[in-house]
Image: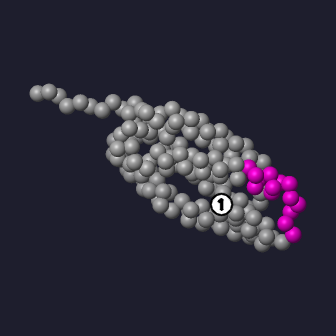
Amino acid sequence: MSDNQQPITEKIFEKIEDLWIKYSIFICIGLGILSGVLHYFGFLTNVRTLAGNVVNFASIVVGVTGVFLTLVITLQESPAFSRLKEFFPAFQKSLYLGLKSQISYGLLVVILSIVITALPPAPFKILASIGVCIWFFFFWKMSLGAFYIVKLITDIIVKNFEIPKRKSRR
């Protein structure tokens, strides 16, 4: 990647991150509704088969998020966290709440997936599509939230290894 492309991609990722922070609930509602509509019109099929694969994915997300939670607890006294606390006093609490909600969404997706596979097919297509809409809302909230949390944690870790430059004594 050339030097000119690097700042452009960073700006794009920062813009996506800002949109996620501000509008994550609306993004997931929109994607959930879109998934429900696609299911209703027959473009999204095999949801029951997909549910088994989603359980595997959600389990991985919950496990990785749990590891991140212990990593954050370990890094509490690191220089990066100290600097973050100075600029953003509520950062640590919001990070913990974000990790906790990711684990909750992952577990909720697993429970909903088990319910979807255990119940008989819905008698009406609209009812099934509403269920798909709700299930996909939580799926998108867990999946896209996991990407955000991974980026946030890796940024903290990278910043932890950056040693601040000292001024010369001239």
Where is residue 71 shown, x and y percent of the image? 53, 34
Quarter of the image where one finds residue 25: bottom right
Report the residue that reaches farthest toward the top: 169
Where is residue 141 shown, x and y percent of the image? 61, 55
Classify residue 119 as left or right of residue 86: right
Q: Name the residue nearer the viewer: 53 or 154.
A: 154
Query: Which quarter of the rendered picture does the N terminus lie within?
Result: top left
Amino acid on which disc 1 is placed: Phe
Magenta-tinted stretch: 109-123
Write the residue at 56% across / 38% down: 68
Residue 148 seen? yes
Report the residue that reaches farthest toward the left: 170
Classify residue 14 as left or right of residue 42: left
Tell me if residue 105 is in the magenta stretch.
no
Where is residue 44 shown, x and y percent of the image? 73, 61
Q: Name the residue nearer the viewer: 41 or 140.
A: 140
Classify residue 113 as left or right of residue 99: right
- The local secondary structure at tag 1 comes to helix
Tell me if residue 118 is in the magenta stretch.
yes
Write the residue at 57% across / 51% down: 145
13 w.r.t. 83: above or below:
below
Query: Which quarter of the rendered picture does the C terminus lie within?
Result: top left
Write the residue at 47% across / 61% down: 22
Pointer 1 local density, CA inside 10 Å: few below 14, some 14–19, many at least 20 = many
Write the residue at 76% across / 52% down: 111
Where is residue 107 shown, x and y percent of the image? 70, 49
